[in-house]
Image (cartoon, grey):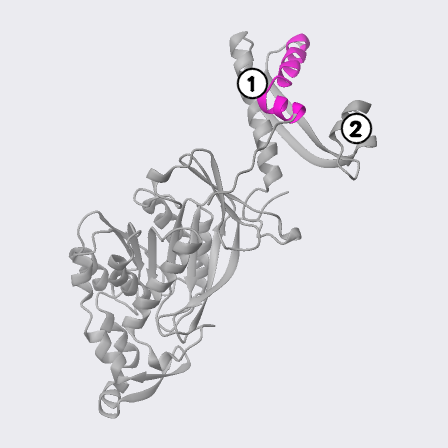
Amino acid sequence: MVRKQHSTQQLSFEGSLGDELQARLDLPSGPIRATAIFAHCFTCSKDIFAARQIASGLAARGFAVLRFDFTGLGTSEGDFVDTNFSSNIADLVRASDMLREAIAGPSLLVGHSLGGAAVLTAAADIPEAEAVATIGAPSDASHVQHNFSCHLDEIRESGKADVSLAGRPFTIKKQFLEDLERHSLTERVATMKKALMVLHSPLDETVGIDNASEIFLAAKHPKSFVSLDTADHLLTGKEDAIYAAEVIAAWASRFVKAAGEPEEDIPEGALVAETGLGKFQNHVRIGHYRLIADEPTSVGGLDSGPSPYDYLATALGACTTMTLRMYADLKKLPVDHIATEVCHSKIHGDDCAACTADEIESKANSKGRIDHFERFITLEGDLTEEQKQALLRIADNCPVHQTLEHGSKVVTKLVE
């Protein structure tokens, strides 16, 4: 079966003003490499093209990406008129709290336009954040005033004004302007102490390229600048959004920490715990390695990772290949490459041609079915038929094979 490139889970959490905010969590199909938050542009939503493309691109590279609608925007509750830049920052911190409880706090923050200014400001309040990437971000939060510049006098004199932004009506209050003016973005950038990547198009007519220069100059190293060439401000070109995702993922890999518990808390065995996402998704920790276990969507899962039986088949396949390699090297056999495919199914005992009557009686469950593993071994090299058969016999000596064949004792204890 070909798995989807990634899956998306719908979530919600309480925003800074007490309203329910709607979110999407884009999950990689394999292990979660790290977690990230994407903050959308002014009056946009989590579902705009750039947000979807970048979240998808990062998920394809192992990032679990949370994108959400700020209070009063998209499908989130609340009234936009009551929000401001400070509430956006607080919403970001709330989103980080939710992601921390579900998987791990975000080690990467990505912000588009005013969302970029928001992640730069909020970064210091998110302890797990190691890297921040901005796309078309202004160097001053009050830059957004140009979107309704002809109404500024009315807002200051009357306390509010109805404006049209991107073809939609919004009410802007005086407190929104005053809050914007209280924030000094370059000061926050200078003391952020996070790795920074500034992505900007030199042809951006909404937020000029000079904003990127001011952010970059204010930041301390490590910092990077990437030109988005002919991209527009909203990254409506698919190739531009994909390129941004690829560059951010590659750059962030140098700085972000893997999702999961701190390194000092490495479990002795395999630690498997629910993520709280979907019905069956579990986060797996084995030493320094982190994986995801799940079930297919056909049985109510998210299909975001291998099933428990997939992992069991993987263990048998890996052990078989390793055992054959050890034997081939010991006997100096000309084996160039070994591959083992394992298929698992539950069949009725009477249909198992390879089973003896005693095996059927001892291994069959209450419904008369037994777990049936079938191995398909590929051996590449200048081997004789006798050598191939010898290797096939050795496959049965694989320790995992022996465990499955002979059974084992499982002792269960309750942890207080």
Give, as a three-letter code, the residue at label 1. Answer: Thr
Name the residue tied to disc 1.
323
Label 2 vs label 1, nearer the camera = 2
User: Answer yes or no: do the residues labelled 2 and 1 have beta carbons within 8 Å?
Assistant: no
Q: Which residues are magenta?
A: 385-406
Q: Residue furthest bottom?
A: 158
Is 387 one of the magenta-colored residues?
Answer: yes
* Nearest the eye: 399 or 208: 399
- Overall secondary structure of the magenta section: helix
Name the residue tied to disc 2.
361
Residue 311: percent from left, percent from top? 57, 36
In the rendered image, which quarter is residue 118 located in? bottom left
In the rendered image, which quarter is residue 377 located in? top right
Q: Indicate the secondary structure of the residue bearing disc 2.
A: helix
Residue for point 32% across, 65% down? 115
* Nearest the eye: 224 or 232: 224
In the rendered image, which quarter is residue 403 located in? top right
Q: CA distance from mark 2 to mark 1?
A: 30 Å
Is 264 one of the magenta-colored residues?
Answer: no
